[in-house]
Amino acid sequence: MEPVARLLLDTHLVLWWLSADSRLPSSVVSLLQEAGQEVFVSQASLWDMAIKTSLGRLSADLAQVDRSIPEQGFRCLSLRNEHQLAPYGPTVRLV
């Protein structure tokens, strides 16, 4: 069966989902709970979390976040060279 949609969560949405944060819009919750969704988390988001944690701007157990992603049924989207060489801005390349 083909997925209904392929979704890519940004750093905030991942953190809010994993912590059941009220800032996560209900429309996003509904979308993520729909059957057949293929949900991705970019390695760039994990990198972003690691940087923010090292700077003291985020308090997160990164190992737990890494374990929780597949437990939630989400898939990691690996970074590849073509992502870094894409013809758009550097932030968009990674996310």
Image (cartoon, helix red, strand yellow):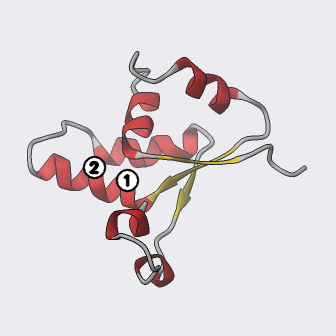
Q: Position of residue 71 (x, y in %)?
A: 56, 40
Mark 1: few, some, or many residues within 10 Å (few <14, many ≥20)? many
Q: Amino acid at mark 1?
A: Ser
Q: Position of residue 33 (x, y in %)?
A: 67, 27
Residue pictured at 17% horizontal, 47% vertical: 53
Question: Mark 2 near mark 1, Cβ–Cβ under 8 Å?
Answer: yes
Q: Position of residue 28 (x, y in %)?
A: 57, 28
Label 2 sits on residue: 49
Q: Who is closer to the viewer here, 50 or 32?
A: 32
The kind of secondary structure element at disc 2 is: helix
- On the rendered structure, is 28 left or right of 45? right
Label 1: state its secondary structure: helix
Q: Quadrant of residue 87?
A: bottom left
Residue farthest front in this picture: 88
Residue found at the very far right of the displayed protein: 1
Residue at 40% across, 29% down? 16
Q: Which mark is residue 45?
A: 1
Q: Is residue 95 above or below residue 9?
A: below
Disc 2 to disc 1, C-alpha distance: 6 Å
36 horizontally vs 76: left or right: right
Report x, y in % for residue 24.
Answer: 45, 24
* Most distant residue in the left direction: 56
